Amino acid sequence: MKRGSPGPRDIYPGCVGLWNDQVFPRVMDRVLRTPEVNARRAEVCQGLHGRVLEIGFGTGLNLRHYPSEVTEILVVEPSKSAMRLAEPRKAAVPASVEHVGIDGARLDLPDGSVDCVLSTYTLCTIPDGNAALREIHRVLKPDGALHFLEHGRAPTESVRRWQHRLHPVHSRIAGGCHLDRPIDEMITHAGFLIRQLETGYGDGPRPFSYLYRGRALPSG
Ligand SMILES: C[S@@+](CC[C@H](N)C(=O)[O-])C[C@H]1O[C@@H](n2cnc3c(N)ncnc32)[C@H](O)[C@@H]1O
């Protein structure tokens, strides 16, 4: 890495100490591969093709759901531990997997250079989620698509209140995760046209499980 370039700790303030560096990626790897989550991963990966950028690659839990039409996978992930845990999964897929960056809000890729972007359970965690969405919009080809599966702000007032209450503690133990981001509004605000959107509570306590799954097109 070049001198002066940001490191994982600069762009991902949650990534400090033994918990966030070593333990949390393992916890995430367990919690995010239940049968329910895997079924949602399979759905959101449908239609991915060509050169795909995955933001917040984590431990590679989406890899086995990529369709065979995907030829190249570029991944952005700040956690070295997560990248290490992903190694066996990378080796098991036919497409090439290249680690191209550590911050979704600063992509070192040319404009209009990827066919699809995939983001699962990540827009909650990137410190500047709006900047990441602008970068995703920039690097997508005009006929490309953002596939997303995220958790975020719930529509129910009482659940939202819990999301606000839990946020300070939750974000410290969950790598900087925000419970209450309005994912659909953020995507639209970045210039996308949402073409498909399913929302609803998944398994688990409601403040943590309001899901947004869909596809968005760079409309501008
Ligand atoms: C809850 S995990 C989800 C991982 C993976 N997408 C999945 O579905 O299993 C959130 C991921 O976002 C990554 N992350 C944190 N800050 C980031 C940033 N600025 N840019 C890209 N990824 C980031 C974390 O390291 C972590 O792997």
Image (cartoon, rainbow, N blue to C red):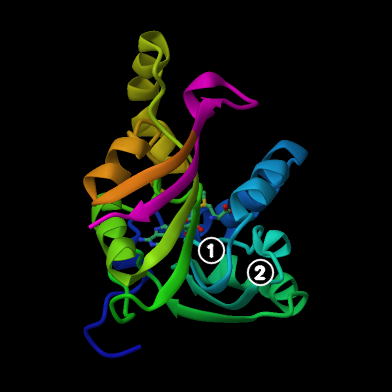
Image side of residue 49 versus residue 179, left or right: right
Q: Earlier in the sequence, mark 2 or mark 1?
A: 1
Q: Dividing the image into 4 quarters, which one contains the N terminus?
A: bottom left
| Residue type pointed to by label 2 | Ala
Secondary structure of residue under mark 2: helix
Image side of residue 220 versus residue 193, left or right: left
Q: Are marks 2 and 1 in contact (CB under 8 Å)?
A: yes
According to the picture, the residue beneath numbered tag 2 turns out to be: 86
Of 115 and 180, the residue lying toward us: 115
Q: Residue at x 42, y 43 (%)?
A: 195
The part of the chain drawn in magenta is 198-220
According to the picture, the residue beneath numbered tag 1 turns out to be: 57
Q: Residue at x 35, y 64 (%)?
A: 104
Residue 176 on image: x %, y %: 38, 46
Residue 148 vs 161, above or below: the answer is below
- The numbered dot on residue 202 is none
